[in-house]
Amino acid sequence: MRESTFQAPDRRYHRTLMLIHSVYFWFKTDADPALVADFEQGLRRLCSIPQIKQASFGRPEQTPPRPVIDQSYAWGLVEHFDSLADHDAYQEHPLHLEFLDRFKHTWERVQVYDVRV
């Protein structure tokens, strides 16, 4: 993985570049309540895929309202990968495909943001 170094006032930052994969989920109003209840366990299982360097998930935080804050989603998932190749392998991993197959019918919307940092 490439490294990035840049200068900021009074500080020097040095970091390894990685891909951050952020996913936000909205459920259909008529989604099966049993599947919705199992979603957190599904996220835990998904996060065990070996290509993931680090993963976190949760529900929207109740930060003070501002026009730029979107708290309409049900769950957010943030995963870090060392490389695009690791991300691509994750996309085809059997646990990821199983997760999609199990929960895709419950989603009204899914929004993904991938960022190289």
Image (spheres, rainbow, N blue to C red):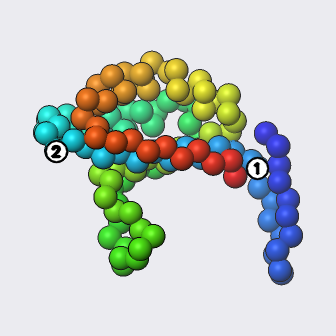
Q: Residue at x 54, y 27 (%)?
A: 90
User: What residue type is disc 1 on?
Assistant: Thr
Q: Nearer the viewer, residue 114 or 50?
A: 114
Q: Which quadrant of the view contains residue 54?
A: top right
Pick whichever of labels 1 and 2 is earlier in the sequence: 1
Q: Is residue 100 left or right of residue 47?
A: left
Q: Secondary structure at mark 2?
A: loop
Q: Which quadrant of the view contains residue 6?
A: bottom right
Q: Which quarter of the image is occupied by the N terminus?
A: top right
Q: Is residue 50 left or right of residue 36?
A: right
Mark 1 = which residue? 16
Q: Is residue 59 left or right of residue 18?
A: left
Extreme-front residue of the structure: 67
Whether residue 5 is situated above or below residue 21 in the rendered picture: below
Whether residue 5 is situated above or below residue 3 in the rendered picture: below
Q: Nearer the viewer, residue 38 or 104?
A: 104
Q: Residue at x 33, y 53 (%)?
A: 73
Q: Nearer the viewer, mark 1 or mark 2?
A: 2
Q: Nearer the viewer, residue 19 or 111?
A: 111
Q: Residue 23 at what x, y percent from top left?
A: 45, 45
Q: Is residue 92 left or right of residue 29?
A: right
Figure label count:
2
Mark 2 = which residue? 29
